[in-house]
Structure formats: C-alpha cells, structure tokens
Amino acid sequence: MKRIALKIDVDTCHGTQIGVPALAGILKNHGAQASFFFSLGPDRSGCASGADSLKRYYGLASRLYGRLLPGPDIGTRCADILRQTHEAGFETGIHAWDRAQWEERILAFGNSLAESAMGKACKRFGDVFGTAPLAHAAAGWRMNRHALRLTQRKGFSYASDCRGSHPFLPVIDGELIDCPQIPTTLPTLDEILVLEPGFSPEQAVDRILQLSKAIPGDHVFTLRAELEGMRFIDAFERLLNSWKGGDCALVALRDIRASLNIADLPRHSVEFAEFAGRAGIRMVQGKAFP
C-alpha cells in the first residue's frame, strides 16, 4: 500500500490557534495520522520574506503589525494547543524558533543564527512537551551547512528540511551528516496555484492526486495550518478522501522513519537552488554521492 506522510508546517500564532485544531479534527475524523511541525517563538509573520508565496495570503494590516509591534510568543500563548495536539496522538516536531527570521537570514548569517535558533526551539519544545524533540522541518526548506550539522548533533531521529524524491543521508561539501532526510516529494497546493494562475484549489487537488498516483513509492505532502487548515480546508478534506479511496495509508513521518534501515540509506549531496513555484533558494536533494 502506498503511504502518504502528511507534514503540517505551522508558521503563525493565528495558524496555531485556528488551523491546528481544525486540521486535527479532520484528521481524527478520517483516521489519518500526521506530523505537526511548530514554530515555537515569536510570530513576526508581517516580516516574512517576499520570496515566500504564502505572503500573498497575509493582509497589509498583518504585515504592518509584524513590523511595528512585538509578535506574540507562540510557544507560550498556544502551549495548550501544542500539548493537546501531541496528546491526541499526532507527532510533533520543530519548524522554527522565529520562522520569519529563519527564512530571511539563515542563508546569509550562518552558524550563529542556526545555533541560537535551534537551541531556543529545542529548549522551548522541552518546556512545552516535557521531552526532547526528535524531528526538525526547516522553515521554507531553507538550511545551511551548520544547521545540517546540528540535526546530527542534537540527536534528531530524522529531519525533513528539503525537497526531493526519497529518504537519504545528506552530504554537504563532502561531509556526511548522520541524520536522515525525509524530503517533501509532492508540490504543495499553493505552489500549483502559483505555477497555474488559472487553477482553482480543486484543480490543484486534482494535480496533486495525479502526481501521487503516477510517481512510484511513498510520498511526503507538506501543508500549512494557515492554508489547508483555514482558506483551503475543503480542498484538503477532498484530498484526504481521495487518498483514502485510492487505498493510500495516511501516516506521520515517524512511520516512514520507522521503516528505514539507516545502514541501507543512499547518500546524496544536497544543493541550494530555485524550486518551481517558489522564489528564492531552497535546499533540494541532489545527486547520489559519491
């Protein structure tokens, strides 16, 4: 049976408060599992990079708020929702400390930002859930060499920081990172809407279903609490129904990880490049190494 792992990125306080409970309820109704990756620090969504196509769904007022006033602290304000999601049986992991800052600065500011942001996110995760995080999913699929090293040093079971086709051990500049990557394999709904301006959300769902059926193997589908949990919630529910009707198992990324034999995983270089449907540089799975 083909497995579709559902990776849910939670970017904002509003998405945590509204989108996360909505998605959790739908997933429970469908008997589906998923992995929620939370932003745990300040919400500065008004300062999000213009490269991120999600910006089109934030209004002017939100952007001005993020620039002029301190953003709400998601990990403290929404701690009950985070814990309830975990207690409902869903996998939880780290998306970012400050999602907007990570996307804007990680490629240019390097080691110090990665060290500080990951350290604060791990501490907050422990404060909220009472346990160390086991999974990391970088905001905007943006990473650098030091951040990749930290996925190993901090003992994550796996990371889902890039776009690609299948699980692998990452190699960067000839250095092997001993933390498997489970990449996003399918386009996101909003990417399809960017690439196909005339498409409706329903047509974007059709495209995702077509690709998930045509491309062999398991898949990872990334969705956002702020989009599929709110604006596109009906389209997402149709996607779930169609996958279930097609005899697909809807799983969490930890289920994919549990079936991997690390010793047998292929090694692939990672690359930093433009990705269809998104402006700016993202981390992608490159060629087999060596």
Image (cartoon, rainbow, N blue to C red):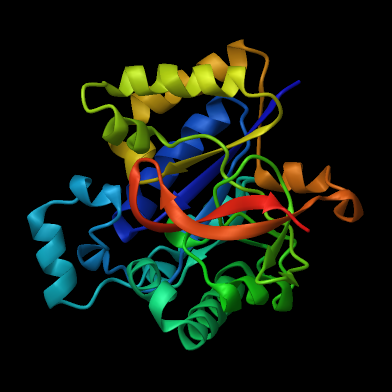
The image quarter in which residue 34 lies: top right
Q: Residue furthest top?
A: 245
Q: Position of residue 236 (x, y in %)?
A: 42, 27
The residue at 20%/64% (across/down) is 46
The residue at 31%/38% (across/down) is 230
Q: Is residue 32 visible?
A: yes
Q: Position of residue 31 (x, y in %)?
A: 62, 27
Q: Quadrant of the N terminus?
A: top right
The image quarter in which residue 196 lies: top left
Check the image and report above or below for 66 versus 5.
below
Q: Position of residue 217 (x, y in %)?
A: 71, 28
For the residue pair 10 and 22, the one nearer the viewer reads as 10
Q: Residue furthest front?
A: 290
Q: Is residue 15 left or right of residue 258?
A: left
The residue at 43%/20% (across/down) is 207
Check the image and report above or below for 81 versus 189.
below
Q: Is residue 258 left or right of residue 284?
A: right
Q: Position of residue 181 (x, y in %)?
A: 68, 55
